[in-house]
Amino acid sequence: GAGGGGYGGQQGYSEERNSARRVADHYSARSNQTLEERENSPIIHLKKLNNWIKSVLVQLYARPGDCVLDLACGKGGDLIKWDKARVGYYVGVDIAEGSIKDCMTRYNGDTDQQRRKKFSFPARLICADCYETRLDEYLCEDAPFDICSCQFAMHYSWSTEARARQALANISALLRPGGTFIGTMPDANVIIKRLRETDEMEFGNSVYWITFGEEYNEKKFPASRPFGIKYKFHLEDAVDCPEWVVPFHLFKLLAEEYDLELVLMKNFHEFVHEYLQKPEFADLMRRLGALGDGRSVQSTLSQDEWEVSYLYLAFVLRKRGPPPSQ
Ligand code: SAM
């Protein structure tokens, strides 16, 4: 089990720190795209699909008036989704200073692109390492939260057991009993399967590649060292940094230690199949532009984009305990 003694094989502390910095610097350095650049991106339909998946999660699990904690919030791309769900309060935390600045700008609505009515909820934005720091100390006045979201970022905590535990301890400490934790991250099953299908230590297509280091030549990942399994991820026009494999069964076990129970886990392909059946979500997909006229999602995205979406999963967990009485 995941309890007690813990797992061996941790990386050195300073190497670990450097990896977190590299991730932060990578995201900080990414500049804002113009609308035109965005529309010309080779992964524009994938980005739209990802936004749809996050919107569906928000619509399914957020309630009006909710207090929201957005871990690894990035440039605040999800602010509008939370606004549509009419949440009451928003706290965003990210390690990348540049992203927090952009998020602030977006919240204040003072860029040309973002000229829009102000958001209807108050917000607080914090620059911090969510997987290193005890966030309850920063956020004691804001907690408890009704819902916590960690989109495309949970896997950055899996570099060491200590960081993975700090991530889950933070979420658990800040959520109210009965509160919800929603997120998206790479699907380790798919990644390891792809790796084993090739003769190389690398695989990908025209829009992404993943490279594992020579230390994994055997393509075996000992159960005794389920943290710190590093690969390099490159996604055209989006990501280029080290990431870590998150074995899902372990994520589930570790989360349970922190009173977070699994409610749902679906690979993106399955998620699309299931929720696209609902007319309101199909409409949303059309409005977002990830569903061309009369076409399926598969044929709106390029084959290579569709393959990338298969590398991800969505999850929902619930903090144990009865929700507070009304
Ligand atoms: N959640 C946003 C979204 O869905 O658009 C951003 C996703 S982006 C792929 C990953 C984000 O994780 C980046 O903004 C990065 O700075 C953030 N991140 C990575 N490691 C982090 C850490 N240790 N603490 C806080 N944020 C982190």
Image: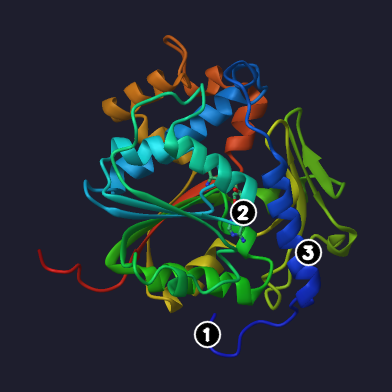
168 lies left or right of 40: left
Q: Mark 3 points at which residue?
A: 18
**Residue 170 or residue 161, whichever sits in front:** 170
Disc 3, ligand 1: is the CB inside 8 Å? no
Judged from the image, the secondary structure of the residue bearing numbered disc 1 is: loop
* Residue at 26% in and 49% down: 88
The quarter in which the C terminus is drawn is bottom left
Decide: few, some or many residues near mark 3? Use Cα within 10 Å; few <14, some 14-19, many ≥20. Answer: few
Q: Mark 1 points at which residue?
A: 3
76 lies left or right of 38: left
* Residue at 67% in and 22% down: 42
Residue 303 location (% of width, % of height): 64, 24
Judged from the image, the secondary structure of the residue bearing numbered disc 3 is: helix
* Residue at 46% in and 69% down: 138
> Dots 2 and 1: beta carbons under 8 Å?
no
Q: Is residue 316 above or below residue 80?
A: below
> Dots 3 and 1: beta carbons under 8 Å?
no
100 lies left or right of 225: left
Residue 159 location (% of width, % of height): 69, 66
* Residue at 66% in and 22% down: 41
Separation of residues labelled 3 and 1 (CA atoms): 28 Å
Q: Mark 2 points at which residue?
A: 189
Decide: few, some or many residues near mark 2? Use Cα within 10 Å; few <14, some 14-19, many ≥20. Answer: some
Separation of residues labelled 2 and 3 (CA atoms): 27 Å
Decide: few, some or many residues near mark 1? Use Cα within 10 Å; few <14, some 14-19, many ≥20. Answer: few
Q: Is residue 203 above or below residue 90?
A: above
Which residue type carries mark 3?
Asn
Choose the circle earlier in sequence order: 2 or 3. Answer: 3
Q: Can residue 73 be seen in this view?
A: yes
